[in-house]
Image: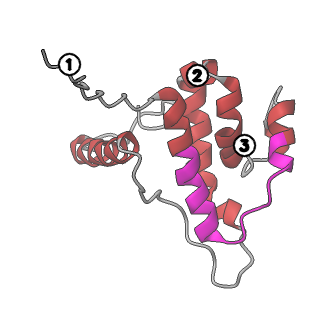
Amino acid sequence: MTDADGRALPAGFDVSRLRVLVLRRHAELDAAIESRQWFDPWVFELDGDGSASPSEAVYAWVAGFATAMEFFPQLLRLDAQRLREPLALLYRHLDADDLEDADDLIEEIESLEPPADLSEAVEELVRATLLLADVSRPLKNEPTKAVRTPRPRR
């Protein structure tokens, strides 16, 4: 399946190159998220005339995330309080009418200042993704070093 609707690829299309590229990108994102490092989300560039909003530029990323949540809703079963901020940072780029049964989330979205520019919108995508990872893929605690307690001399 190459899209959310499950449409078949054109006859004769060799999917092997696409699969390699998708898996490579997945590995890049997985490594960055696992180590809580910056990554560059692929977003659309804004029109030079200034008529497009930052939300229009990041819409495809957010819509892809929302589609993934339909197919893989396990994330939404985790700590709702900790999910609220990152989901608001993402879903604020969608039309509020598309958010069903999300009054708390809409309230959170309305409390946010809109991103000033594309750079800020992209930073918030990355921040939201890493906050979601903190909930869904918590970092393993570093092993504590054994502390030697001095023994009294005899």
Q: Label 1: how many residues lie within 10 Å, few (<14), some (14-19) or many (20+)?
A: few
**Where is residue 2 shown, x and y percent of the image?**
42, 37
* Mark 2 or 3: the one toward you: 3
Q: Judge whether 121 appears above or below 72 on screen.
A: below
Q: Residue at x 41, y 56 (%)?
A: 39
Question: Quick check: is 113 in the magenta stretch?
Answer: yes
**Label 1 sits on what residue type?**
Pro
Q: Residue at x 50, y 44 (%)?
A: 130
Q: Tag 2's secondary structure?
A: helix
Q: Quadrant of residue 77?
A: top right
The first of marks 2 and 1 along the sequence is 2
Viewer-side residue, 77 vs 145:
145
How many marks can you see?
3
Q: Is residue 16 visible?
A: yes
Specify the segment rendered in magenta. 108-129
- Residue on which disc 1 sits: 152
Q: Label 2: how many residues lie within 10 Å, few (<14), some (14-19) or many (20+)?
A: few
- Residue on which disc 2 sits: 73
- Residue on which disc 3 sits: 88
The first of marks 2 and 3 along the sequence is 2
**Label 3 sits on what residue type?**
Ala
